[in-house]
Image (spheres, helix red, strand yellow):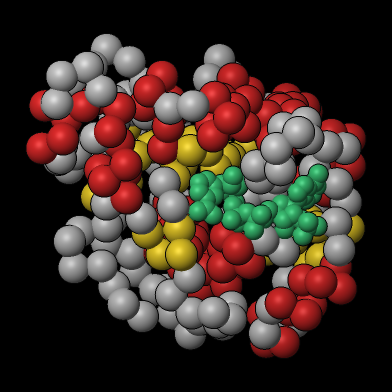
Amino acid sequence: MKVLQLGGNGNLGSRVIPALLAHNHAVVAYVRSPQKLRDILPQSVVERITIIQGDSLDTDAVADALRQNNCDALVNTSGTRQPRGQEQNLGKIVASVTSAAIQVGKDRGRPVRAWIIGGMSSLKYPGTPYQIQDYMPASLIGHQRGVEEAVKDLSTSDVQWSLLCVAMMSPAHEKVQALAEPRKHNFLLQSGTPPAWQDHWIRYVPFIGVYLNLVPTISSYTTKLEDVADLIAEDLSKQKSEWVGEFVGFKAPKEEKSA
Ligand SMILES: NC(=O)c1ccc[n+]([C@@H]2O[C@H](COP(=O)([O-])OP(=O)(O)OC[C@H]3O[C@@H](n4cnc5c(N)ncnc54)[C@H](OP(=O)(O)O)[C@@H]3O)[C@@H](O)[C@H]2O)c1
């Protein structure tokens, strides 16, 4: 596939680019600072991609990038939680990017495939009728609610979206690496709720246990950025993805890859 990657200068986006290449996708990187991207990526990766300067909030520019480069798919890793006191614009970014995808899909008569990055807080809290975010402070998850609002009612006949519901990610390698072959994640994946959920004993403390349980339990969903990048790139290789229109939870098996 030809993939528009938005947010390549970030922690995840910079790892998504080599993962896409390793899965034989063509990559168009859409970033605010092309020079920063050239500095982050290995030269062998830079040589294999097209770089476009732009802001993800500029819907027309995103649509032009998709159209002019004949991209079939996009991965949005652009935008993140803003510091306290500043407006959370992640929802606006996702709304802008998905609107661009919808426009282009309508023009072509074929919807664009899109992976959007959201938070694990958008998943259902197992054993309750609520979402995880309903048990978390608004200051921590407000930006993720914006993402969820921007995608949840989109029709998959307009844009073939999937929302990847991420907990915490850490790098396996400090610097971005070129990949001779795919890294091969081995995540468990599940739609709507986190896979392999195991409550901590603290959940059974009356009244507050359901809140306190989230701290140790969510930390067991920490993953490596490079594996998350591989998940996305691998899925884009499929003719038909089972994750279209889904909030996707995922977890590394107990023996997390160390490198
Ligand atoms: N990292 C985690 O553990 C974690 C956990 C849960 C969810 N997430 C979500 O996963 C996504 C990626 O995370 P990350 O760690 O890779 O974030 P990151 O390192 O902060 O990267 C975000 C990137 O978005 C770019 N960006 C921001 N506003 C933009 C705009 N208007 N137009 C174009 N680019 C823009 C930034 O570009 P500049 O370089 O130009 O500033 C930055 O490179 C985020 O949505 C984050 O909320 C991350």
**Is 42 located above or below residue 217 in the figure?**
below
Q: Is residue 173 left or right of residue 253?
A: right
Using the image as rendered, state which of residue 212 and residue 21 is in the foreground: 212
Asked whether the viewer can see residue 42, the reply is: yes
Residue 196 rendering spot, x and y as whole percentages: 17, 42
Which residue is rendered at x = 88% and y = 51% of the image? 54
The quadrant holding residue 136 is top left
Using the image as rendered, state which of residue 160 and residue 117 is in the foreground: 117
Using the image as rendered, state which of residue 127 and residue 246 is in the foreground: 127
Residue 214 rendering spot, x and y as whole percentages: 30, 36
**Is 242 located above or below residue 206 in the figure?**
below
Q: Is residue 132 left or right of residue 35?
A: left
The quadrant holding residue 227 is bottom left
Which residue is rendered at x = 36% and y = 80% of the image? 259
Which residue is rendered at x = 57% and y = 72% of the image? 18
Q: Is residue 237 left or right of residue 98?
A: left
Q: Is residue 58 left or right of residue 206?
A: right
